[in-house]
Amino acid sequence: MDAMLNKLLSCFGVGGHEDEVRKVIIDELKDIKCEIKEDKMGNLIVKIGEAPEKLMFCAHMDEIGLIATYIEDNGFIRVGSIGDFKTNDIVHNLVKFKGGAIGKVAAAKSNPEIGDLFVDIGASSRDEALKIVREGDVASFFGDAFEAQKNIIGPGLNNRVGCYILLRLIKEIKETNKELYFVFSSQAELGGRGARAAAFSIEPDKCIVVDLEESGDAIGGKNNIKLGKGPVLTVMDRSLIMHHEIKEMLENAAKEKEINIQYASTSRISEGGTIHKEKTGVKTGMIAIPCRYNHSISEMVNVSDIEGAIELLKAVL
């Protein structure tokens, strides 16, 4: 696995706690000629070039996770969700709290809802648990990412893969006639708060969001998206219809570079939904990497799709 991607995947970065991810990104850009700013929402905004036309790229730093809501007398930790995921996907898996405590996710009943989940850190009482974890502490899903059969498998791929793509773009860009903003956004799993604030301050003419999209090639899949068949243009979701100029720009670049692309229409809400409405409006679209088991503890993406997205966006630039 690429060392830079592995660094990003090793960071703790549940929504609202993206500090480690920011540090890795800043370190990776220390030798690059660019302007770097952290805003009040915790977004990291990288600017390259000066020109009348502003083009913004956006990928969120945060990942799904849990937040401790109440600690029982017996030491079990009741939790709430940060981000959207299926509770059955995380039962019997490990989580790691920001303070370092590791525990097992268990459920009070079969087919649980979030209120039926608790984390067992091995404490025998509330007082013992409170020495390690307190209400309001957050936890990420615990596990190492690895590469197998040209696929990368592990937690947190959504959306450290997008951050990796933006970093590659910044490092590999040769020249541009646009004013470029690369936004590593915060709190996407909490409603896209960071991306909205960044779009408000930058006022870009156009924006391309880089994210992951659920593929349909796993058992029980419900769409035609496949791993290894190229990046995905999400033409519509519940919050955004891709602007036709962005769509044409990406399609023309794909044709020029002979990159296969796929198309998706989904019912989810994306960062593009908050970005495109800011100020007087932003022409917005989304390019996504196909992902099996999206928003789970073992997400899976294909290396060739990542490379295809990078080449596609370089062609746009």
Image: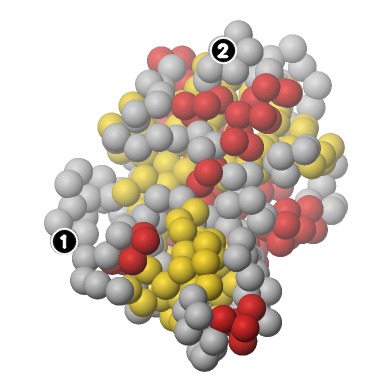
Determine whether the residue tagged by mark 1 lies in a helix, strand or loop: loop
Residue that sits furthest to the top in the current view = 280
**Which residue sits at x=61%, y=87%?**
128
Residue that sits furthest to the left in the current view = 220
Identify which amino acid the numbered label 1 is placed on. Answer: Ile
Residue 219: assigned label? 1
Identify which amino acid the numbered label 2 is placed on. Answer: Gly
Residue 192: quarter of image: top right
Q: Nearer the viewer, residue 211 or 104?
A: 104
Q: Position of residue 70 (x, y in %)?
A: 52, 67
Residue receiving disc 2? 281
Crowding at mark 1 (Cα within 10 Å: few <14, some 14-19, many 20+): few
Q: Position of residue 135 (x, y in %)?
A: 60, 65
Tell me if residue 286 comes above or below residue 13 in the rendering: above
Would residue 139 be visible to someone looking at this image?
yes
Tell me if residue 134 comes above or below residue 262 in the rendering: below
Marks 1 and 2, how far apart at CA:
40 Å
